[in-house]
Image: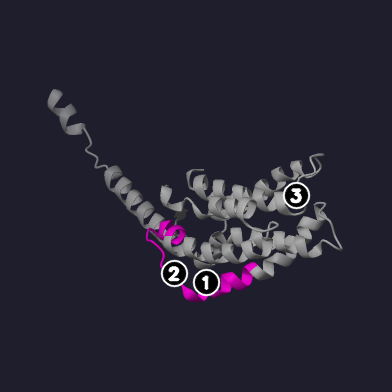
Amino acid sequence: MSSRKRHGIKKTVSFSDDEAFLRRRSSKNENKRMGLLNPPVYVRKTIGTVPIHLPGLTYYYLKISNDFDTVRLLYMLIVTQLLFLVFQFNRNTIYGNKRLKIHFGSLAISIVACFLLTLPCMLLIVLMGAPFGMLLWETWLLAAHCCFLAFPAVYSVFNCDFKVGVFKNYFLSICIGCWVSCVVIPLDWDRPWQEWPIPLVVGGYLGAFVGYTICSYV
């Protein structure tokens, strides 16, 4: 009787382990394919992205320059931002698990783009309440400073196939810096540095300094 029961037991073979292995393999292949289509873009968490030139330029603007020379400051900003991009920011920007090299075509396009972006940036500043008319030149200078403060991020957007997401915080930090600095303009202190657009230029520089320093950690 017991031998009959033993002969009556059916043996089955399970392919669950093989199916799980195939699913894992398929998932890895899919992740690899998606990684090739959408390579990761990020800025390394390092002190190498700290823009030490921005506090120096701010000090020059407030303490050394004659009558807050915003035009000369812009020339100095463009040069130092180029150096900052080449020797600091770009070296710590990772695209597709590798460091990016400087692409001179994207560099030239980014410079032209920053100049072109001054027009919509100036329009936005005017719509936010900036003076229009006699102070239009000063408003354009503020827009130019904002655009070239964002120059490393603009270049990285072009060089990383227009992946804006990781770089949007750098733009926001400049905008927030300008917006917060507006509070000193209406104060009845009668100081020369309260004239338009000096406080916003300083606020943009401080916002950019904070942004390039901490945005890679956010």
User: 124 above or below 119?
Assistant: above
* In the foreground, 183 or 95: 183
| Disc 1 residue crowd, few under 14, some 14–19, many 20+, Cα 10 Å | many
Residue 128 showing in the rendered view: yes
Identify the magenta region. 88-114
Is residue 110 one of those drawn in magenta?
A: yes
Q: Residue at x 42, y 56 (%)?
A: 92
The earlier-in-sequence mark between 3 and 2 is 2
Q: Residue furthest left?
A: 3
Is residue 171 one of those drawn in magenta?
A: no
| Disc 2 residue crowd, few under 14, some 14–19, many 20+, Cα 10 Å | some
**Image quadrant containing the N terminus:** top left
Amino acid carrying label 2: it is Ile
Residue position for label 2: 102
Q: Cβ–Cβ below 8 Å for labels 1 and 2?
A: yes
The earlier-in-sequence mark between 1 and 3 is 1
* In the foreground, 73 or 92: 73
Amino acid carrying label 1: it is Leu
Q: Residue at x 42, y 62 (%)?
A: 87
Image location of residue 107, percent across then percent down: 52, 71
Image location of residue 48, percent across then percent down: 42, 52
1 relative position to 156: left or right: left
SS assignment at label 1:
helix
Amino acid carrying label 3: it is Pro
SS assignment at label 3:
helix
Q: Toward which corner of the image does residue 90 lie, by quadrant?
A: bottom left
Residue position for label 1: 107
Q: Residue at x 71, y 49 (%)?
A: 199
Distance of mark 3 from mark 2, alpha carbons?
A: 41 Å
